[in-house]
Image (cartoon, rainbow, N blue to C red):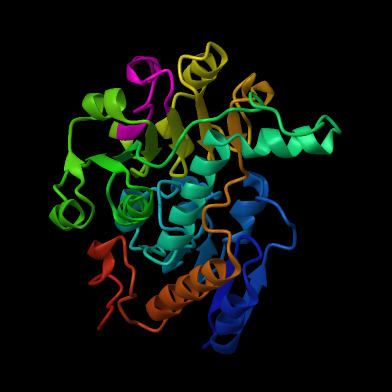
Amino acid sequence: MGWKVYVTRLIPDAGLQMLRERCQVVEVNPHDRVLARKELLPAVVGRDGVLCLLTDRIDTEVLDAAKGCKVFANCAVGYDNVDVPAATARGIAITNTPGVLTDATADLTWALIFAVARRVVEGDRFVREGKFEGWAPMLLLGGDITGQTLGIVGAGRIGQAVARRSVGFQMKVLYTDPSARQELEKEVGARRVELDELLREADFVSLHTPLVTETRHLIGRRELSLMKPTAYLINAARGPIVDEEALVEALRDQRIAGAGLDVYENEPALASGLADLPNVVLLPHLGSASTQTRTRMATMAAENLLAVLEGRIPPNLVSADVTDRLNLRR
């Protein structure tokens, strides 16, 4: 119970309360921003556990500074911000928060689909600027959704949830994934295809693959050139999956109809010219940003962290090879 824990940014109070009830010291980043490297390194020194976020780069430098730390509990489903092999080599457990944000992120994906296809953001701005003078037959014409083809790139939990939501819009569903998703095929009539075929046929290309070496710039100039000029690209996964400069070119030259983005290649910075384009909807990484979802993420991360400190295998352990070194039990 004498554990010392550091939380790299303010999270919902339910998660903090769990930590405070069972740890001697719980220190939280007092700033409402990502810690600079010179702030993060001393903050993790002498900690038994660290609850971190996807915006924290947990590399060898941080892991070495956190000598003696048993766990980094990442409050995110993805963990591409963490050097997992380096943590494993140092006997540090890494955990994540899968599953809990599936519905919230799938819902937001559909918000992006509707917003960009039906030009919702442009319409809102048009009205606010006093330009609306009444109904007009050619005003802000957008793309149809019902009956169109939805392409899912990465049919994991979130990709499948997005696909299932398409049933109400009578959409044809294509997907690309390393594994066949037979249940999804039965439920929505989805068909597994290669990426190039998906890009050529889909009216909406929605990205849900994790960010790994093989998926960095998965969507570049060549891939964008395969898409229909009437198609839309949606990214609520990870920014670097898309070559953002190539996307700016494709949008500017109207080689595709539009894009809806919740994530960015060099977040929070945007590629030059992206914010100037009218045919892209830009959100500030809101995929899991519902009160219920973020609260559950915080409590799940706290549960993972406390389990390791208490000598138990946490519910969501990424680095399974550390169980023996940390003497974790079920």
Q: In this picture, is 179 found above or below 32?
A: above
Give how far across and how far down residue 259 sits, in percent. 51, 30
Q: Tell me the quarter of the picture where residue 322 sits.
A: bottom left
Q: Position of residue 158 (x, y in %)?
A: 36, 54
List x then y, in percent, for residue 86: 35, 50
Residue pictured at 37% horizontal, 31% vertical: 203
Residue 155 in view in this figure = yes
Viewer-proximal residue among 310 and 251: 251
| Residue situated in front as seen by the camera: 315 or 220 | 220
Picture quadrant of residue 168: bottom left
Extreme residue in the top direction = 253
The image quadrant of residue 262 is top right
Counting the numbered discs, the total is 0
What residue is drawn where x is 51% and y is 46%?
57
State the extent of the magenta-drawn residues as a range: 215-231
Answer above or below: position of 283 versus 197: below
- Toward the viewer: 153 or 87? 153
Q: Is residue 51 above or below residue 22?
A: above
Seen from the viewer's position, the closer of residues 1 and 241 is: 241
In the image, is 140 to the left or to the right of 329? right
Q: Residue 172 in the image: x percent, y percent?
A: 27, 41
- Residue at 38% in and 27% down: 217
Residue 67 visible in the shown view: no
Q: Is residue 41 magenta?
A: no
Q: Residue at x 53, y 40 (%)?
A: 263
Instruction: Give the quarter of the figure containing the C terminus.
Output: bottom left
Whether residue 230 appears in magenta in the rendering, the answer is yes
Residue found at the very far right of the displayed protein: 130
